[in-house]
Image: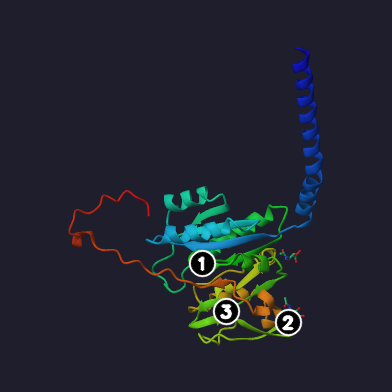
Amino acid sequence: MPFVNIKKQYIALGMLFFVVLFFFNNKPALQCQLSTEVATYLPTIYGITPTYARLAQKADLTRLSQTLMLVKNFHWIVIEDSTTKTKLVENLLKESTLKYTHLNVKTKTSEHSSASGVEQRNLALDWLRGHLKKSEDTKGVVYFMDDDNTYSLRVFEEMRKIDKVGVWPVGIVGGMRVEMPVVKDGKVIKFNAVWKPFRPFPIDMAGFAINATLFLEQPKAMFSRKVQSGFQESEILKYFAATKDDLEPLAENCTKVFVWHTRTQKPSITNPKNLKHTPMPDHHIEV
Ligand SMILES: *[C@@H]1O[C@H](CO)[C@@H](O)[C@H](O)[C@H]1NC(C)=O
Ligand SMILES: *[C@@H]1O[C@H](CO)[C@@H](O)[C@H](O)[C@H]1NC(C)=O
Protein backbone atom coordinates (compact mmCIF):
# COMPACT_ATOMS: atom_id res chain seq x y z
CA MET A 1 0.00 0.00 0.00
CA PRO A 2 1.44 3.45 -0.94
CA PHE A 3 0.14 4.98 2.31
CA VAL A 4 2.32 2.65 4.38
CA ASN A 5 5.35 3.36 2.19
CA ILE A 6 5.14 7.11 2.78
CA LYS A 7 4.92 6.57 6.51
CA LYS A 8 8.05 4.42 6.49
CA GLN A 9 9.95 7.12 4.63
CA TYR A 10 8.92 9.72 7.18
CA ILE A 11 10.03 7.47 10.00
CA ALA A 12 13.39 6.90 8.31
CA LEU A 13 13.86 10.63 7.73
CA GLY A 14 12.88 11.37 11.29
CA MET A 15 15.37 8.87 12.62
CA LEU A 16 18.12 10.27 10.42
CA PHE A 17 17.32 13.73 11.75
CA PHE A 18 17.74 12.57 15.33
CA VAL A 19 20.95 10.72 14.57
CA VAL A 20 22.42 13.85 12.96
CA LEU A 21 21.21 16.00 15.86
CA PHE A 22 22.73 13.62 18.39
CA PHE A 23 26.07 13.56 16.58
CA PHE A 24 26.38 17.35 16.35
CA ASN A 25 25.26 17.80 19.93
CA ASN A 26 27.92 15.45 21.22
CA LYS A 27 30.83 16.49 19.07
CA PRO A 28 31.84 19.64 20.96
CA ALA A 29 31.52 17.83 24.30
CA LEU A 30 33.73 15.03 23.00
CA GLN A 31 36.40 17.46 21.80
CA CYS A 32 36.29 19.33 25.08
CA GLN A 33 36.77 16.13 27.07
CA LEU A 34 39.78 15.11 24.97
CA SER A 35 41.52 18.47 25.29
CA THR A 36 41.09 18.67 29.08
CA GLU A 37 42.58 15.20 29.41
CA VAL A 38 45.65 16.34 27.52
CA ALA A 39 45.89 19.62 29.43
CA THR A 40 45.63 18.18 32.95
CA TYR A 41 48.75 16.03 33.22
CA LEU A 42 48.88 14.37 36.61
CA PRO A 43 52.15 12.97 37.97
CA THR A 44 51.79 9.39 39.20
CA ILE A 45 51.51 8.88 42.94
CA TYR A 46 53.40 5.81 44.14
CA GLY A 47 51.83 4.73 47.44
CA ILE A 48 54.12 2.40 49.41
CA THR A 49 52.24 0.27 51.92
CA PRO A 50 53.81 -2.45 54.08
CA THR A 51 51.28 -4.96 55.43
CA TYR A 52 51.29 -8.05 57.65
CA ALA A 53 48.86 -10.90 58.36
CA ARG A 54 46.40 -10.29 61.23
CA LEU A 55 42.68 -10.64 61.78
CA ALA A 56 41.74 -7.12 60.65
CA GLN A 57 44.13 -7.09 57.68
CA LYS A 58 41.51 -7.66 54.99
CA ALA A 59 39.17 -5.11 56.55
CA ASP A 60 41.92 -2.48 56.67
CA LEU A 61 43.15 -3.21 53.14
CA THR A 62 39.60 -3.18 51.77
CA ARG A 63 38.93 0.25 53.24
CA LEU A 64 42.22 1.64 51.99
CA SER A 65 42.02 0.11 48.51
CA GLN A 66 38.54 1.50 48.00
CA THR A 67 39.77 4.98 48.87
CA LEU A 68 42.65 4.55 46.44
CA MET A 69 40.30 3.49 43.65
CA LEU A 70 39.09 7.10 43.64
CA VAL A 71 42.59 8.53 43.13
CA LYS A 72 43.66 9.20 39.54
CA ASN A 73 47.06 8.05 38.31
CA PHE A 74 47.83 6.07 41.41
CA HIS A 75 50.20 3.10 41.61
CA TRP A 76 49.98 1.05 44.79
CA ILE A 77 53.09 -0.83 45.94
CA VAL A 78 52.04 -3.33 48.59
CA ILE A 79 54.75 -5.27 50.41
CA GLU A 80 53.82 -8.18 52.62
CA ASP A 81 55.89 -8.98 55.69
CA SER A 82 55.95 -12.62 54.70
CA THR A 83 58.19 -15.27 53.12
CA THR A 84 55.57 -15.82 50.38
CA LYS A 85 52.78 -13.75 48.88
CA THR A 86 49.44 -14.63 50.46
CA LYS A 87 46.28 -15.46 48.51
CA LEU A 88 44.34 -12.97 50.62
CA VAL A 89 46.42 -9.97 49.54
CA GLU A 90 46.86 -11.27 45.99
CA ASN A 91 43.10 -11.61 45.46
CA LEU A 92 42.32 -8.32 47.12
CA LEU A 93 44.72 -6.53 44.77
CA LYS A 94 43.43 -8.38 41.69
CA GLU A 95 39.84 -7.50 42.49
CA SER A 96 40.62 -3.86 43.31
CA THR A 97 40.99 -2.57 39.68
CA LEU A 98 43.98 -0.60 40.98
CA LYS A 99 47.33 -0.37 39.26
CA TYR A 100 49.56 -2.22 41.72
CA THR A 101 52.82 -4.01 42.39
CA HIS A 102 52.77 -6.85 44.89
CA LEU A 103 56.02 -7.63 46.73
CA ASN A 104 57.02 -9.54 49.84
CA VAL A 105 59.93 -9.72 52.26
CA LYS A 106 59.99 -11.19 55.73
CA THR A 107 61.24 -8.97 58.56
CA LYS A 108 64.26 -10.47 60.32
CA THR A 109 62.73 -11.32 63.69
CA SER A 110 66.03 -11.31 65.56
CA GLU A 111 66.24 -7.54 65.18
CA HIS A 112 64.54 -4.54 66.74
CA SER A 113 60.78 -4.92 66.47
CA SER A 114 59.98 -1.21 66.74
CA ALA A 115 61.40 -0.47 63.28
CA SER A 116 58.61 -2.29 61.48
CA GLY A 117 58.27 -1.77 57.76
CA VAL A 118 61.98 -1.03 57.14
CA GLU A 119 62.73 -4.03 54.89
CA GLN A 120 59.36 -3.72 53.17
CA ARG A 121 59.70 0.00 52.34
CA ASN A 122 63.30 -0.48 51.19
CA LEU A 123 62.27 -3.30 48.86
CA ALA A 124 59.59 -1.02 47.42
CA LEU A 125 62.17 1.73 46.85
CA ASP A 126 64.46 -0.75 45.04
CA TRP A 127 61.55 -1.75 42.83
CA LEU A 128 60.64 1.90 42.20
CA ARG A 129 64.17 2.81 41.09
CA GLY A 130 64.21 -0.10 38.64
CA HIS A 131 60.78 0.87 37.37
CA LEU A 132 61.61 4.56 36.90
CA LYS A 133 64.89 3.77 35.12
CA LYS A 134 63.06 1.94 32.36
CA SER A 135 59.96 4.13 32.13
CA GLU A 136 59.59 7.18 29.91
CA ASP A 137 57.83 9.21 32.56
CA THR A 138 60.03 9.54 35.64
CA LYS A 139 57.77 12.16 37.17
CA GLY A 140 55.86 11.17 40.24
CA VAL A 141 55.45 11.40 43.96
CA VAL A 142 56.32 8.81 46.64
CA TYR A 143 54.04 8.53 49.66
CA PHE A 144 54.59 6.06 52.53
CA MET A 145 51.17 4.86 53.61
CA ASP A 146 50.17 2.70 56.60
CA ASP A 147 47.42 0.21 55.83
CA ASP A 148 45.18 1.41 58.68
CA ASN A 149 45.44 5.21 58.38
CA THR A 150 42.56 7.32 57.07
CA TYR A 151 43.24 9.34 53.91
CA SER A 152 41.12 12.12 52.49
CA LEU A 153 41.22 12.35 48.70
CA ARG A 154 42.48 15.89 49.21
CA VAL A 155 45.85 14.74 50.54
CA PHE A 156 46.55 13.23 47.10
CA GLU A 157 45.57 16.46 45.34
CA GLU A 158 48.01 18.32 47.58
CA MET A 159 50.99 16.05 47.00
CA ARG A 160 50.82 16.43 43.22
CA LYS A 161 52.01 20.03 43.73
CA ILE A 162 55.31 18.84 45.23
CA ASP A 163 58.56 20.06 43.77
CA LYS A 164 60.91 18.18 46.15
CA VAL A 165 59.41 17.40 49.57
CA GLY A 166 55.91 18.39 50.65
CA VAL A 167 54.64 18.37 54.24
CA TRP A 168 51.23 18.71 55.91
CA PRO A 169 49.53 18.10 59.26
CA VAL A 170 48.56 14.61 60.49
CA GLY A 171 45.54 14.18 62.75
CA ILE A 172 45.49 12.12 65.97
CA VAL A 173 49.15 11.16 66.29
CA GLY A 174 52.04 11.46 68.75
CA GLY A 175 49.66 12.08 71.65
CA MET A 176 48.26 15.16 69.94
CA ARG A 177 45.07 16.20 68.18
CA VAL A 178 47.24 17.20 65.27
CA GLU A 179 50.99 17.02 64.72
CA MET A 180 52.17 19.57 62.19
CA PRO A 181 54.81 21.90 60.82
CA VAL A 182 54.26 25.48 61.98
CA VAL A 183 54.22 27.82 58.98
CA LYS A 184 54.92 31.54 58.82
CA ASP A 185 54.95 33.57 55.60
CA GLY A 186 54.74 30.36 53.60
CA LYS A 187 57.81 28.75 55.24
CA VAL A 188 58.11 26.00 57.85
CA ILE A 189 59.59 27.68 60.96
CA LYS A 190 59.21 24.84 63.49
CA PHE A 191 57.16 21.77 64.43
CA ASN A 192 54.57 21.41 67.18
CA ALA A 193 55.46 17.77 68.05
CA VAL A 194 55.63 16.77 71.74
CA TRP A 195 56.76 13.16 71.17
CA LYS A 196 60.56 13.15 70.73
CA PRO A 197 60.60 16.79 69.57
CA PHE A 198 64.40 16.58 69.26
CA ARG A 199 64.03 14.48 66.10
CA PRO A 200 65.55 16.28 63.05
CA PHE A 201 62.13 16.13 61.37
CA PRO A 202 59.51 15.43 64.08
CA ILE A 203 56.73 14.45 61.68
CA ASP A 204 54.81 11.25 60.99
CA MET A 205 55.27 9.08 57.89
CA ALA A 206 51.79 10.16 56.72
CA GLY A 207 52.77 13.84 56.85
CA PHE A 208 55.10 14.09 53.87
CA ALA A 209 55.71 12.91 50.31
CA ILE A 210 58.79 13.09 48.11
CA ASN A 211 59.32 13.71 44.39
CA ALA A 212 59.91 10.24 42.89
CA THR A 213 62.56 11.43 40.40
CA LEU A 214 64.81 12.38 43.32
CA PHE A 215 65.10 8.71 44.34
CA LEU A 216 67.11 8.17 41.16
CA GLU A 217 69.41 11.04 42.09
CA GLN A 218 69.79 9.62 45.62
CA PRO A 219 70.40 5.89 45.05
CA LYS A 220 71.37 5.39 48.71
CA ALA A 221 68.20 6.91 50.16
CA MET A 222 66.51 4.26 52.26
CA PHE A 223 65.24 3.40 55.72
CA SER A 224 67.57 2.00 58.35
CA ARG A 225 67.35 -0.65 61.04
CA LYS A 226 70.00 1.21 63.02
CA VAL A 227 67.91 4.20 64.09
CA GLN A 228 65.66 4.34 67.16
CA SER A 229 61.88 4.35 66.91
CA GLY A 230 60.39 7.56 65.56
CA PHE A 231 63.50 8.39 63.56
CA GLN A 232 62.61 6.60 60.30
CA GLU A 233 60.98 9.72 58.88
CA SER A 234 64.08 11.80 59.62
CA GLU A 235 66.26 9.02 58.23
CA ILE A 236 64.66 9.11 54.78
CA LEU A 237 64.06 12.87 54.70
CA LYS A 238 67.74 13.69 55.36
CA TYR A 239 68.55 12.64 51.77
CA PHE A 240 66.12 15.15 50.30
CA ALA A 241 65.91 18.05 52.74
CA ALA A 242 68.92 19.57 54.52
CA THR A 243 66.78 21.64 56.90
CA LYS A 244 63.16 22.59 57.47
CA ASP A 245 63.66 25.39 54.91
CA ASP A 246 63.59 22.75 52.17
CA LEU A 247 60.11 21.54 53.14
CA GLU A 248 57.16 22.76 51.08
CA PRO A 249 54.14 23.39 53.31
CA LEU A 250 50.95 22.12 51.65
CA ALA A 251 47.32 21.74 52.80
CA GLU A 252 46.81 25.53 52.86
CA ASN A 253 50.06 26.35 54.63
CA CYS A 254 49.58 23.38 56.99
CA THR A 255 46.25 24.59 58.34
CA LYS A 256 44.16 21.63 57.13
CA VAL A 257 44.09 17.98 58.19
CA PHE A 258 43.68 15.58 55.26
CA VAL A 259 45.14 12.43 56.86
CA TRP A 260 44.65 10.77 60.24
CA HIS A 261 46.90 8.27 61.97
CA THR A 262 44.00 6.02 62.95
CA ARG A 263 44.74 2.59 64.44
CA THR A 264 42.49 -0.42 64.11
CA GLN A 265 41.83 -1.92 67.53
CA LYS A 266 43.11 -5.46 67.96
CA PRO A 267 39.96 -7.60 67.82
CA SER A 268 39.29 -9.96 70.72
CA ILE A 269 37.82 -13.24 69.58
CA THR A 270 36.11 -15.68 71.94
CA ASN A 271 37.98 -18.94 72.25
CA PRO A 272 35.85 -21.61 70.49
CA LYS A 273 36.30 -23.86 73.54
CA ASN A 274 34.32 -21.37 75.62
CA LEU A 275 31.32 -21.35 73.29
CA LYS A 276 28.39 -23.34 74.71
CA HIS A 277 27.00 -24.44 71.35
CA THR A 278 29.02 -26.34 68.78
CA PRO A 279 31.47 -23.92 67.16
CA MET A 280 30.30 -22.66 63.80
CA PRO A 281 32.06 -24.31 60.86
CA ASP A 282 33.62 -21.01 59.81
CA HIS A 283 37.27 -21.99 59.53
CA HIS A 284 37.09 -22.10 55.71
CA ILE A 285 35.78 -18.56 55.40
CA GLU A 286 38.28 -15.80 54.62
CA VAL A 287 37.72 -12.86 56.96
C1 LIG B 1 60.26 16.33 40.37
O1 LIG B 1 61.57 16.66 39.96
C2 LIG B 1 61.76 16.63 38.55
C3 LIG B 1 63.23 16.84 38.27
O2 LIG B 1 63.76 17.87 39.06
C4 LIG B 1 60.83 17.66 37.91
O3 LIG B 1 60.98 17.62 36.50
C5 LIG B 1 59.39 17.39 38.30
O4 LIG B 1 58.55 18.39 37.79
C6 LIG B 1 59.25 17.34 39.82
N1 LIG B 1 57.90 17.07 40.26
C7 LIG B 1 57.20 15.93 40.08
C8 LIG B 1 55.85 15.86 40.66
O5 LIG B 1 57.63 14.99 39.45
C1 LIG C 1 50.57 30.49 52.17
O1 LIG C 1 51.16 31.64 52.74
C2 LIG C 1 51.80 32.51 51.81
C3 LIG C 1 52.52 33.59 52.57
O2 LIG C 1 51.69 34.16 53.56
C4 LIG C 1 50.77 33.04 50.83
O3 LIG C 1 51.39 33.86 49.86
C5 LIG C 1 50.10 31.86 50.13
O4 LIG C 1 49.06 32.32 49.28
C6 LIG C 1 49.52 30.90 51.15
N1 LIG C 1 49.05 29.71 50.43
C7 LIG C 1 47.82 29.18 50.61
C8 LIG C 1 47.48 28.02 49.74
O5 LIG C 1 47.02 29.59 51.42
Residue at (71% x, 68% y) in the render = 161
Ligand 2 appears in which quadrant?
Answer: bottom right
Q: Which residue is mark 2?
A: 186
Residue at (57% x, 52% y) in the render = 98
Location of residue 263 in the rendering, given as x and y in whole percent from the top left corner: 45, 71
Q: Nearer the viewer, residue 2 or 111?
A: 2
Label 3 CB-ligand 2 distance < 8 A: no
In the image, residue 96 above or below residue 236: above
Label 2 CB-ligand 2 distance < 8 A: yes
- In space, the residues marked 3 and 2 are separated at their CA atoms by 18 Å
Looking at the rendered structure, the secondary structure element under dot 2 is loop
Q: Which numbered disc, 3 or 2, marks the residue that appears first in the sequence?
A: 2
Q: Quadrant of the N terminus?
A: top right
Q: Which residue is mark 1?
A: 146
Can residue 250 be seen here?
no
- In space, the residues marked 2 and 1 are separated at their CA atoms by 28 Å
- Disc 3 crowd, CA 10 A, few/some/many (<14, 14-19, 20+): many
Q: Quadrant of the C terminus?
A: bottom left
Q: Nearer the viewer, residue 57 or 40?
A: 40
Q: Which numbered disc, 2 or 1, marks the residue that appears first in the sequence?
A: 1
Location of residue 66 in the rendering, given as x and y in whole percent from the top left corner: 53, 57
Q: Which residue is mark 3?
A: 203
In this rendering, would 261 be left or right of 268? right
Label 1 CB-ligand 1 distance < 8 A: no
